[in-house]
Amino acid sequence: MNKVELLVKVKELGLLAVIRGPSPELTIKMVEALVAGGVLGIEITYSTPNAEEVVRALSRMYGNRIVLGMGTLTKPEQALTAKEAGACFLVSPVCEPRLVKSMAESGLLIMAGALTPTEVFQAFTLGADVVKIFPGSLGGPAYIKALKGPFPYIPMMPTGGVNAGNVADWFSAGVVAVGAGSELCPPQLAKDGKFDEISKRAAEFVQVVKSARA
């Protein structure tokens, strides 16, 4: 998929699982459990051990069956190595100009992190296809609604503070998708081998997202 098609797909899914896995093996099992529950948007963060190898393995396993990306980019060179590993979208928690420029040059769908109105505008101007509002918990859906006043044309996705109980509020505020981490896929469940519970949470989250946008 090209970048335009991928953005349409992300909007269609409405949900990205943000995974900070405890180990490469457990991270892959976490993804398997999420996919079994219907979550098809997967972001492997660079804080996951051997993150690029994990993405390579997942790319081989799933191909186009999932939308696979890498997150928590903090170094410009990671944009290229993430792409080479098989990522089709890139996410950073910050809006550092050199980093966002290198992400944009990758040709992949990119999401740069921002919080203040100035950062949101800067991220979009530098080439972010979607602005990641992080941490979303700081302002909540009401803050997104306020940002959409001056920036109705900027696609936004909150991460941090997203849970099954407030998904509808985020979409009502105007986001294109939500990013969910520990509320969706707690690493401790993987450490405890409770992958069925991860699948159950995934199915519930997917249903909540569908209902919120119905």
Image (cartoon, rainbow, N blue to C red):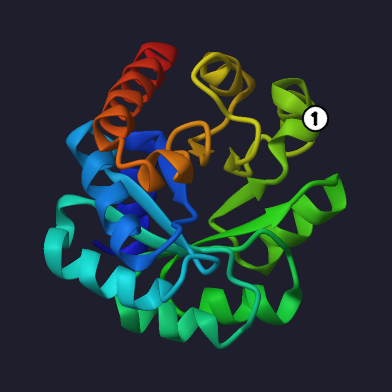
Amino acid type, mark 1: Gly
Horizontal side, residue 76 vs residue 80: left or right = right
Between 65 and 184, the one lying in front of the other is 184
Task: Please report the residue visible at 58 percent of the width from the left and 29 percent of the height from the top.
Answer: 162
Tell me the SS state at disc 1.
loop
Expressed as whole percent of the image width and height from the top left, the position of residue 12 reads 32, 35
Task: Please report the residue visible at 18 percent of the width from the left and 36 percent of the height from the top.
Answer: 36
Above or below 186: residue 104:
below
Between 89 and 198, the one lying in front of the other is 198
Residue placed under numbered mark 1 in the picture: 139
Between 17 and 32, the one lying in front of the other is 32
Number of on-image labels: 1
Task: Please report the residue visible at 51 percent of the width from the left and 41 percent of the height from the top.
Answer: 181
Quadrant (top left, top right, bottom left, bottom right) of the N terminus = bottom left
Expressed as whole percent of the image width and height from the top left, the position of residue 23 reads 40, 64
Task: Please report the residue visible at 40 percent of the width from the left and 34 percent of the height from the top.
Answer: 14
Q: Quadrant of residue 57?
A: bottom left
Q: Categorize mark 1 by other alpha carbons within 10 Å: few (<14), some (14-19), many (20+).
A: some
Quadrant (top left, top right, bottom left, bottom right) of the C terminus = top left
Above or below 145: residue 10:
below
Identity of the residue furthest to the front in this view:
192
Above or below 152: residue 28:
below
Expressed as whole percent of the image width and height from the top left, the position of residue 199 reads 26, 31
Between 212 and 31, the one lying in front of the other is 31
